[in-house]
Amino acid sequence: MKVQLIFRTARLPVPHRERLADMSDVSLTAIAAICDGNRGIGKNKELPWPFLKEDYEFYTGICMATRDPNKQNGVITGRVGWEAFPDSMKTHPRLSTVVTSTTLSADEPFCRGVARDFDEAVQMFTRAKDKDGVENIYILGGRVNYEHAVTDPRCRRLIITRIFQDFDADVFFPEFDHVFRRISDPDIDDRIREDPVTGIKFRFEVWEKI
Ligand SMILES: NC(=O)c1ccc[n+]([C@@H]2O[C@H](COP(=O)([O-])OP(=O)(O)OC[C@H]3O[C@@H](n4cnc5c(N)ncnc54)[C@H](OP(=O)(O)O)[C@@H]3O)[C@@H](O)[C@H]2O)c1
């Protein structure tokens, strides 16, 4: 992760300097799978659609891949999402998770920390003493964290799995096509694919902040 210190921070008191340094070149990416029609992402604390093996492998592959084998990826998730994390993600050596929650205690096991709001969660990866071991910061939901991600200037990319079928949902991804535009990324194959078990069609998309 590149963090660039900007000149005008030099004479500020340390807490202010640290906050401005956090804002300089931190890049956040949100990853979500959404229904094409209603932007549904969740239902009864689960995904609205049946398990899609290829999408799960795509999502975990991105979260767990680092170019530098000595670094981790930071991921930010809400409490409900965290409670649904499989143990393999909670304990994965390449993942360092901050959970946003106002109710979990600070010593929640397996995570890097519990943050009381979105900014505190980002800071847990970007403070000077923390940033060097972190390569990417991914926002993994849920609704409130995605709303922050879409409006926060530090969030420059969305990686979306678009599900070409509508499912009943009780949690929705915010509107984003007024602030992001779809781009082609040579590393991500954006052909429409079909799950062999369910027949559900879906596509991986990359969007960047306009
Ligand atoms: N399709 C996808 O890509 C995708 C991705 C993620 C989740 N989901 C689905 O979405 C649903 C979960 O999303 P959700 O929005 O209901 O739950 P969530 O964000 O995972 O958890 C909600 C709880 O997290 C805490 N929280 C979240 N954001 C916070 C913030 N910025 N600051 C402080 N606390 C915060 C609060 O916990 P406290 O009550 O402890 O304060 C809140 O009650 C599930 O159905 C899940 O399967 C889908």
Image: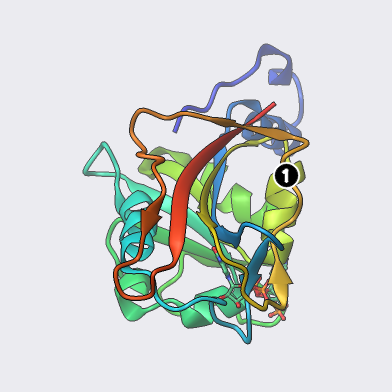
Residue 157 pos. (x, y %): 57, 37
Q: Give the vertical position of 122 relative to 2 (above or below).
A: below
Colour approach in the figure: rainbow
Which residue is farthest bottom?
Answer: 44
Q: Which residue is drawn at 36% across and 50% down?
A: 62
Q: Residue 36's quadrant in the figure? A: bottom right
- Pointer 1 residue Cβ closer than 8 Å to ligand 1: no
Residue 42 pos. (x, y %): 62, 74
Q: Which amino acid does label 1 sit on?
A: Phe
Q: Is residue 123 left or right of residue 55?
A: right
Q: Which residue is drawn at 75% across and 31% down?
A: 13
Residue 159 pos. (x, y %): 51, 45
Q: In this view, does 207 lie to the left or right of 168?
A: left
Q: Residue at x 32, y 68 (%)?
A: 53
Which residue is farthest top?
Answer: 7
Q: Residue at x 69, y 18 (%)?
A: 10
Residue 28 pos. (x, y %): 57, 41
Q: Can residue 128 be seen in this view?
A: no
Q: Which of 186 and 29 is in front in this view?
A: 186
**Quadrant of the snapshot with the C terminus:** top right
Q: In this view, does 41 lie to the left or right of 160?
A: right
Which residue is farthest left?
Answer: 69
SS for dot 1:
loop
Q: Name the residue under label 1.
A: 176
Q: Give the vertical position of 166 relative to 183 (above or below).
A: below
Q: Nearer the viewer, residue 96 or 170?
A: 170
Q: Residue 18's quadrant in the figure? A: top right
Q: Residue 178's quadrant in the figure? A: top right
Q: Give the vertical position of 59 relative to 158 (above or below).
A: below
Q: Which of 91 and 58 is in front in this view?
A: 58
**Quadrant of the snapshot with the N terminus:** top left
Q: Which of 149 and 51 is in front in this view?
A: 51
